[in-house]
């Protein structure tokens, strides 16, 4: 028996012995989700939310699990609740933006990425999300500057490298000469506008 399945069994036993312990439910749901037991993770998050309906981490986890389950509309509801409860959580804003983007709501998604960047302007995933939203709204050329900001923050960020390749057809390599510096740094790039 591998280590993760053993850990899952321990979480299951702990949750059975302490069904009202939100910390056990939260950590167990996270482990279940990471191990691919998506439906069970959703159920654990839902049980925990019944116990602590104002806990933003539970709504964020539920939204992430629902997204993994393919329940995009339900995920958006849970993620909206997470940012309502904790508006300073850049991760929740970014996850909501990603869910909205997958749901075809590019303009609102861009606003979520802007909110995340307003909290942490060095959050690479939010720059990549913003680039994806702008690419759909205004085309690839308009989006390149946002992915370049993500790459200026972390050249090895795989999602940014893949998106840049998708947008312009080339990927900077670690052994290649340094790519042209991004025209804008995180502090200079426009947050709150769509180009």
Image (tube, rainbow, N blue to C red):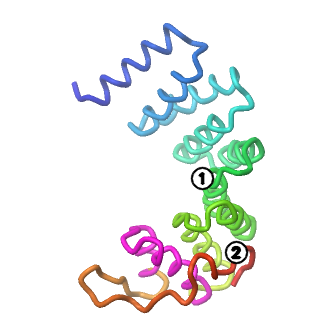
User: In the orientation shown, which residue stands out farthest toward the top?
Assistant: 17
Confirm whether the magenta stretch covers residue 98.
no
Residue designated by label 2: 191
**Position of residue 194 in the picture relative to residue 16 (left or right):** right
Q: Does residue 48 lie above or below 33 as drawn? A: above
Residue designated by label 1: 91
- Alpha carbons under labels 1 and 2: distance apart: 16 Å
SS at badge 1: helix
Residue 98 occupies which quadrant of the picture? bottom right
Write the residue at 50% across / 73% down.
Answer: 150
**In terms of depth relative to the viewer, which is nearer, 21 or 12?**
21
SS at badge 2: loop
Residue 148 point in image, percent of width and height = 50, 81
The image quadrant where one finds the C terminus is bottom right
Disc assigned to residue 8: none
Mark 1: few/some/many CA within 10 Å (<14, 14-19, 20+)? many
Write the residue at 61% across / 13% down.
Answer: 20
The magenta segment is 141-165
- Mark 1 or mark 2: whose residue is earlier in sequence: 1
Residue 88 point in image, percent of width and height = 70, 51
């Amino acid at each position: 028996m591998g280590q993760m399945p053993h850990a899952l069994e321990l979480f299951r036993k702990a949750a059975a012995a302490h069904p009202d312990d939100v910390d056990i439910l939260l950590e167990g749901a996270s482990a279940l989700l990471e191990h691919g037991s998506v439906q069970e993770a959703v159920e654990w998050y839902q049980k925990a939310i019944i116990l602590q309906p104002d806990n933003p981490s539970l709504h964020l986890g539920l939204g992430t699990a629902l997204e993994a389950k393919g329940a995009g509309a339900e995920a958006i509801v849970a993620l909206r609740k997470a940012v309502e409860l904790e508006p300073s959580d850049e991760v929740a804003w970014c996850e909501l933006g990603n869910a909205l983007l997958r749901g075809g709501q590019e303009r609102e998604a861009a606003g979520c990425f802007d909110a995340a960047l307003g909290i942490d302007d060095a959050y690479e995933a939010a720059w990549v999300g913003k680039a994806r939203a702008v690419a759909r709204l205004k085309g690839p050329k308009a989006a390149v500057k946002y992915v370049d900001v993500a790459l200026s923050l972390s050249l090895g960020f795989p999602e940014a490298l893949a998106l840049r390749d998708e947008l312009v057809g080339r990927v900077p390599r670690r052994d290649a000469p340094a790519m042209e510096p991004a025209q804008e740094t995180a502090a200079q790039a426009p947050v709150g506008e769509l180009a």
